[in-house]
Amino acid sequence: MRYSIRTVGSGTGMPVEITELNDTNCKTYLLVSGSHVALVDPVRERTETYRQVLAERALVLEMIIETHTHADHLMLNQALKDELGAPLLMHRESPIPLVDRHLDDRERMHLGDEEIEFLHTPGHTPDSTCECQALS
């Protein structure tokens, strides 16, 4: 299995690792803080790959983040979301009924010992977001 890893840090704590999982035009990432992970923009057809990576690295999936409503691939359905066992987060503008928590601009969520900040960046779609490691 091929995937790339890079780390970014804010200088305030441990860096958050960013792991790219899909070697395709539709990118999926893991944000990793210690053993805690967020799965970003999963593609329905690759769910088994994500489970394999989580198991191999003994990672705990804490959240699934969709950065926007996707027209280029199939997002998770209810059965796969339930199977992965983590809440789905999207911006408040998202029309997707599977969302467990709608986020506002600059809202923060804990991932392990770090905080991830959600920035509303409409343009590509009205519900687009960018995620970054929050600065204190």
Image: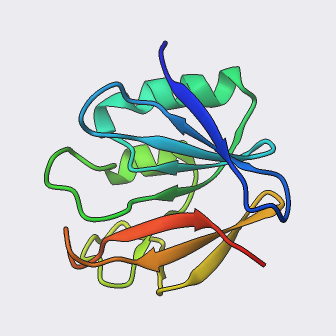
Q: Is residue 43 left or right of residue 52?
A: left
Looking at the image, which residue sits at the far top? Answer: 1
Which residue appears at 49% of the width and 12% of the height? Answer: 1
Residue 76 is situated, as x and y percent measured from the top left of the image, at 34, 49
Q: Position of residue 121 (x, y in %)?
A: 34, 77
Q: Nearer the viewer, residue 129 or 49?
A: 129
**Residue located 84% across and 60% down the image:** 113
Q: Position of residue 42 (x, y in %)?
A: 39, 44
Q: Which residue is at a point 39% across and 60% down the rendered structure image?
A: 66
Count all numbered tags in the image, as a single digit. Answer: 0
Q: Is residue 5 above or below residue 85?
A: above
Closer-to-camera residue (135/71): 135
Left of 10 or right of it: where is 82?
left
In the rendered image, the vertical position of residue 64 relative to residue 51, given as above or below: below
Q: Tell me, what colour scheme is on the image?
A: rainbow
Give the image quarter of residue 110.
bottom right
Residue lying farthest to the front in this orientation:
11
> Is the residue 104 above or below the residue 24 in the image?
below
State the image quarter where residue 45 is shown.
Answer: top left
Q: Name the quadrant of the C terminus.
A: bottom right
Residue 119 lies, in percent from the top left, at 47, 77
Q: Establish if 128 lies above or below 4.
A: below
Is 107 displayed left or right of 59 in the figure? left
Q: Residue at x 54, y 62 (%)?
A: 87
